[in-house]
């Protein structure tokens, strides 16, 4: 009979965004030794902060995300809310400069605006404080052998290769996930199956056919703009718009939104077809288009700020990805955008990613998954030992989480 060793198993989490950080915290709390790998430099250093400011849609964190934070890390939700601003409704702006408030809830419930980078930095601080978590930056995943439980990273500082062995791998490395791409070579699911429709039940936790994957770019791109703080009669910073609303300028095929920040500024995001933005190839063209389309927004953003941001900040694509199943045996799981990226029009992308962690954490508790692994019988390669409880939990996650996520992806696309 196998007996449990006292040595904790090692979980490798790929991707140190908010979802990866929360997953690392959850595994560490469960007793696993965790290594968290990120291909980019530490976002908390000044050079990384300036780059992040050019392309980050603010997060409207809802109960879905707050509940996940609170379950995994007690007290985290309240700590993060101190850096958030409650938005109790939408403020719709028309072409004539009129605005109409649309409350989200008759009882005053709200969503909360928080800077995505600030949330990520705070979670990095939380995860680096865990004694059984090691965080490694500038490590880019290039290959994976899930059957032999090994990952190959490139150290981006010196281009050397690093082979890392694991007991469990979490892919939280975003829409262009390398973990997902590597899993597609080995993961199997019973056909026929279409990622646009409800899926059949998985045959068992091991599976026998290929993963299905779908990717779609929409015609719109987004560009980030900044609305500065105003000054009151005493020279103190003040909001130029009502801070307790999500401001929206809907214009048929394009849209501008603005979310408040603690420093009294607003982060604005323009969504529009690339063809529409391509016409705006001079300062005069940009200002003229905004004056016609978003006159009240132009007044508070300012012509110089608008032109500077429009010319400097990158245009970023919007995409939807769907994959099934999300797991491989007892070896690996995809969470967040790596499993289900969605367009931001429903405001639930990152909230769903955080919820992924909560759901998986609950399944680990329900199945009684231990951080220590059984000792293999004599002559048995540890890489060939399957933790049946873990495999069952991951299969249940794939089988039951998919339809909820597909529904939210469709709501976002149609919103």
Image (spheres, grey):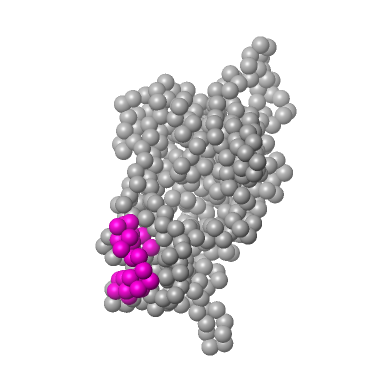
Question: The magenta stretch spans which residues?
Answer: 270-294
Q: Nearer the viewer, residue 224 or 391?
A: 224
Q: Locate residue 128, reporting x and y percent.
A: 68, 48
What residue sits 57% from the left and 87% below the top? 234
Q: Quadrant of the N terminus?
A: top right
Is 113 drawn above or below residue 134 in the view shown?
A: below
Q: Nearer the viewer, residue 247 or 142?
A: 142
Q: Quadrant of the C terminus?
A: bottom left
Is 164 drawn above or below residue 87 in the view shown?
A: above
What residue sits 60% from the left and 37% below the top? 154
Q: Locate residue 236, reporting x and y percent.
A: 57, 82
Is 252 drawn above or below residue 361 in the view shown?
A: below
Residue 12 picture quarter? top right
Q: Locate residue 46, reporting x and y percent.
A: 63, 60
Is 124 drawn above or below residue 248 in the view shown?
A: above
**Furthest residue toward bottom:** 233
Is any part of residue 359 visible from this angle?
no
Q: From the image, give the main secondary structure of the stretch colored magenta.
A: helix
């Amino acid at each position: 009979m196998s007996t449990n060793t006292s040595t904790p198993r090692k979980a490798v989490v790929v991707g140190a965004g908010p979802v990866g950080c929360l997953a690392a915290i959850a595994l560490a709390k469960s007793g696993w030794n965790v290594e968290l790998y990120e291909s980019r430099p530490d976002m908390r250093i000044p050079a990384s902060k300036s780059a992040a400011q050019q392309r980050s849609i603010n997060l409207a964190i809802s109960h879905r995300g707050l509940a996940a934070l609170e379950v995994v890390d007690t007290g985290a939700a309240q700590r993060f809310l101190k850096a958030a601003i409650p938005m109790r409704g939408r403020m719709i702006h028309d072409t004539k400069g009129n605005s109409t408030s649309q409350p989200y809830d008759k009882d005053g419930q709200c969503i909360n605006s928080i800077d995505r980078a600030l949330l990520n930095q705070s979670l990095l601080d939380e995860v680096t404080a865990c004694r059984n978590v090691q965080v490694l930056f500038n490590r880019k995943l290039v290959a994976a052998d899930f059957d032999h439980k090994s990952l190959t990273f490139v150290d981006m500082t010196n281009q050397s290769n690093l082979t890392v062995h694991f007991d469990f791998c979490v892919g939280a490395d975003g829409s262009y996930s390398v973990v997902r791409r590597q899993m597609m070579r080995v993961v199997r699911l019973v056909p026929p199956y279409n990622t646009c429709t409800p899926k059949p039940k998985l045959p068992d936790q091991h599976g026998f056919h290929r993963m299905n994957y779908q990717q779609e770019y929409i015609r719109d791109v987004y560009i980030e703009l900044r609305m500065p703080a105003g000054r009151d009669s005493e020279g103190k910073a003040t909001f130029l718009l009502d801070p307790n609303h999500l401001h929206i300028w809907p214009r048929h095929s394009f849209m501008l939104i603005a979310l408040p920040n603690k420093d009294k500024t607003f982060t604005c995001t323009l969504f529009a077809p690339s063809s529409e933005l391509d016409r705006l190839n001079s300062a005069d063209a940009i200002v003229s288009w905004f004056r016609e389309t978003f006159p009240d927004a132009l007044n508070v953003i300012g012509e110089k700020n608008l032109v500077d941001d429009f010319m400097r900040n990158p245009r970023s694509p919007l995409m939807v990805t769907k994959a099934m199943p999300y797991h491989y045996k007892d070896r690996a799981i995809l969470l967040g955008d790596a499993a289900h990226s969605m367009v931001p029009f429903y405001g639930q992308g990152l909230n769903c990613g955080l919820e992924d962690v909560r759901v998986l954490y609950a399944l680990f508790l329900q199945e009684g998954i231990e951080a220590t692994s059984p000792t293999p019988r004599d002559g048995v390669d540890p890489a060939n030992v399957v933790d049946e409880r873990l495999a069952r939990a991951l299969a249940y996650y794939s089988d039951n989480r998919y339809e909820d996520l597909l529904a939210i992806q469709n709501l976002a696309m149609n919103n």
